[in-house]
Image: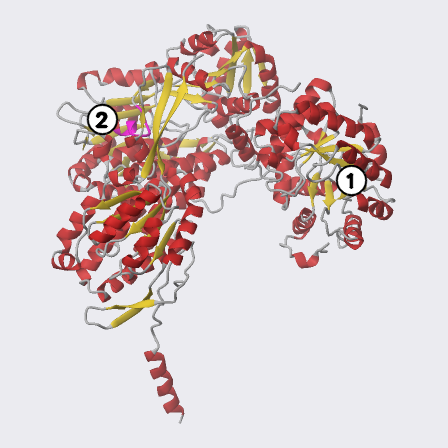
Amino acid sequence: MAKKQTNDDTSQINTMNSIPKTYKNYINGEFPRTESGRYYSVEALDGKHIANVGLSTRKDIRNAVQAARKAQASWANKTAYNRGQIIYRIAEILSGRREQFTNEMVLLGYTKEAAELELNACIELIVYFAGWTDKIGQVFGSVNPVASDHFNFSRQEPVGVVGILSPETPSLLGMLGLLLPNMVAGNSQVIIASKQFPLPSCTFAEVLATSDVPAGTVNIITGLKSELIPPISQHMDVDVLVGDHSLDIELRVMCELESASNMKKVYFWESFISLEELNSSPNETISTCVHSLKDPYHILHLQEVKTTWHPISE
Amino acid sequence: MIDRIPIDAVGIQERVARICTRSIKKESKLQALDLALRMMDLTTLEGSDSEGKVRQLCNKALHPYTELPNIPSVAAVCVYPNRVALAKSILKNSSISIASVATAFPSGMSSLQIKLDDVKFAVSEGADEIDMVISRGAFLSGEYAKVYDEIALIKEVCGTAHLKVILETGELGSLENVRMASDLAMKAGADFIKTSTGKISPSATMPVVLVMLQAIRDFHETTGRKIGMKPAGGIRSSKQAIQYLVMVKETLGNDWLDPSLFRFGASSLANDVLMQWVKEKTGRYQSLNYFSND
Amino acid sequence: MSEKNLSDQSTRSNQASISIDWSYADAPESTSHVTFSKHYGLFIDGSFTEYNENQSFESINPTNGESLYRCTEANKSDVDAAVTAARKAFKGTWGTTSGTQRSHYLYRIARMLQERAREFAVLESMDGGKPIRESRDIDIPLAAAYFFYYAGWADKLAYAFPGKSPKPLGVCAQIIPWNFPLLMLAWKIAPALACGNTVVLKPAETTSLTALKFCELLHDVGLPDGVVNIVTGAAKTGEYLVQHPDIDKIAFTGSTGVGKVIQQSIAERQLPATFELGGKGAFILFDDAALNEAVEGIVNAIFFNQGHVCCAGSRLLVQEGVAEKVIDLLKKRMQHLIVGDPLDKNTDIGAVNSKEQLETIQRYVKTGIQEGATCFECSGSLPTSGYYFPPTILTGVSQSSTVVQEEIFGPVLTIQTFRTTDEAIEKANNTPYGLANGIWTDKGSKIFYVGSKLKSGVVWSNTYNKFDPTSPFGGFKESGKGREGGISGLHAYVKLDHNGGMY
């Protein structure tokens, strides 16, 4: 009798030894579900169900923008050195969770090699941008030799709240490529994750939550771009939209059109790469991608130039 | 009438930061805790202050902590005018003063006559000290003579009660304004200048207190008169209280380290000081369970 | 309006005043967690050489005059071994390391320095005499910040040199002084490594400890062998280093006298060299300044770090109308300065770095008095053992007084008055030095006007002795050539084309 019980016990333990995660949004430093309660199923290439992910709505966008706006001033007021250290710490934390990410990517259809290369590239990109916070002003700011007795200087300042429309692939590198210059610029963000490959972005929220990034600075939500782009592009308290050319042309046009509501700046960068390209020649595609992402001009786009005059006299 | 003194806020912050690096340990810490208690104005200023509430506060003032002998008395209790008589009846045989807020506290938004009557009432009920508020609206619109005259008239009706002038520094907008208001109040007859009503945020902060102490120092230099200082509101920990004492010592010297010239307007500070005291004596960190919760 | 006096207060107020004399008990920093060796070899090619008693010298703890540890005096062949190791690393491992990889090493150094900050701070104070509060709150955090800042440049150099493809120079010989030992090491090593160079560095002979401890860090970080080499020693070792035929660059921070000697000795070699030398900064205080903050600024400018600061504001030029008030406020402030054991957390002014320096300071003050100056010292007591000098001000001096002309390098301030803005500028510039000056006024336009006319590499307005890795620092005239910090700090460590670099 006793022996049978033990067998049952061990077999019960074996089948329940993994506790799959519920993937949620990341807003204001917390992990709420979408207000709508709707979800979509994320599947592996062979159709196997991997996870249920929220189909967020305009209300989630509303909440995320509110959180971003509240957090933006204090993020911008930190010293450049402090922001640089915080961004560097994201790399430290991501580095420690390497396997968690590569496993998710493989489930989604990456080859193991491509997953590891992409993750290394992500870490490298984070460290790269961490080093720009206290230098971007030196390279692109100026003291202007005006033809009068005035000290005149130009500095870059953050724009405010930015809506980030993540590319479909690369799932994490693509999102970081749009996120990092923004953080350096001193802005706060509302990110709409890749629809097809949302998991690394959701898990990245955990990295943000455990680094020293203040709550609300970065917000990540999942869902359909066709449902989420209308509210975010119309939102009067969003200052910039960034995305890439892989976004449907109608949605891109909508962004441009709706930006007139409050004169948002809208930027669409060159297309990122497809999963096929990534898997077939990971080394080459990742390094080309990283090379084009390591660009401080992306930061400039996300800042305002303020020029100040002051008299020089006894 | 009052000169504008330039003040560099960054410089003030740096001096404050350096003061906060002072490490006060051992016997100097015990001395500081003793001082802090003796300088305390235990305060209750709520619309909901019933007689029972005030009674409780007065009892706490008389018996802060019965476990240890030789705990000194606090300097005063601070209440609304209609509770002065009650407080007086409980504390009349002790060395603890009765301070009353007055002049349409906390806003000061009433007629001069009402404000004067408010003071007269409190004094007639037995208040030893009056804590008045200045007219911030008038100050911010540059009506300095009006602010000055009000203070002078209120001082007259105080009689022998001493007058603390609350500047409500959290509404004044800049350290230079704090300095100007301090100079104005002292010239008009204040015995003490006080930071805040405790009803708005921010209340007392270290940069503001440093500026006010500098004003007191300079006033003493020119007139020979020693005016007292009272930071009020927002001081909850012994650590903060001790930092203020360092600031007083290094700006004004040992003379001002005395309840006749320096007070803390606080309520929860008392228990924290007592807890620190017991910790210094016994070596153990304390729990609020062992200190009366009035 | 009735006059209120104290006796009225006590009749209806609380108990009688008991005035107390409240002083601060000692608050010693704990040293139990700190370890260091009694004997050190040289750090060459990734490891320490074996210590040899016959080739050693002692380092004195200035708080008690006793020997703290002994280290090796590098001789000519030691220096040669170090340069050889640096050359090998430059040609080999380091030369092929990408900017990205270099940045990752430098970030790790910064992070580890932050992790071990308290240990380094305690050692810095024990070795050099500066108060623990300064090493804890300024020296060590700032050193980490310089590594962090330059780490970020390593893979971005093209943006610092538009139109050029910057390349490293090679092996850099670096000599640093004793007033901010670890910080000066960071100022030298961080930009050099960021640009792809390798380094042979000689710390000052009275303060080798944190540099040697730093080598442990390099080992933990896994920096390739030979990239950084530390050769301890005195003037002779410095000479061997500077004269070595296989170095590509010299960076020297120290006295103007030695700087000139080095400049002469390398004349025939066309070697790029940068110098951070002495200074005699003017602290210009206008009558419309925020006076209280200015007085605190004076304390920062000349008394902290015992005045061992090349950019110290050692000459107060105060506008005549406020001179008396300022001097009075200053004297009052000085009474609260605590001169004492560097390891006590309340100490404001620590020990003078060495017996020699103490004697130099004493000599200058004596000369000053002989030339007619009036001397006022802060009244606090001095410790009975070790090398200490109280904060001192000298009034009744003039532009031609020795104490106004020459750099004292101690906590001694000379005070002169001026009447007009132009007079202040003239007096400030009337010196062969040109490192730093300070302007104190409430008027912005005056700051820009005076700032544009002062002949110094650094102008501080309504502040003093502020340092930041992004902010270039260096002197005009005999205070040196070259800048450290910011983009300018990179200029000294790259070759831009076949014509060479900037120096």
The reply to whether residue B10 is visible in this rendering is yes
Q: Position of residue B36 (x, y in %)?
A: 70, 41
Examine the image and state in which quarter residue C230 appears.
Answer: top left
The reply to whether residue C338 is visible in this rendering is no
Inspect the image, locate mark 1, and give the three-letter code of the amino acid beneath it. Ala
| Label 1 neighbour load within 10 Å: few <14, some 14-19, many 20+ | many
State yes or no: residue C487 in magenta. yes
In the figure, is residue C424 to the left or right of C292? left
Question: Residue C249, which numbered label?
Answer: 2
In the figure, is residue A64 to the left or right of B45? left
Asked if the residues shown at circle 1 and circle 2 are in contact, with their CB atoms under 8 angstroms apart, the answer is no
Q: Is mark 1 on a helix, strand or loop?
A: strand
Numbered range of the magenta stretch: C483-490
Question: Residue B99, which numbered label?
Answer: 1
Q: Position of residue C2 (x, y in %)?
A: 81, 24
Residue extending furthest toward the bottom? A1
Viewer-proximal residue among C91 and A4: A4
Question: Residue B263, which numbered label?
Answer: none
In the figure, is residue B11 to the left or right of C214? right
In the figure, is residue B94 to the left or right of A211? right
Return the chain for callout 1.
Answer: B
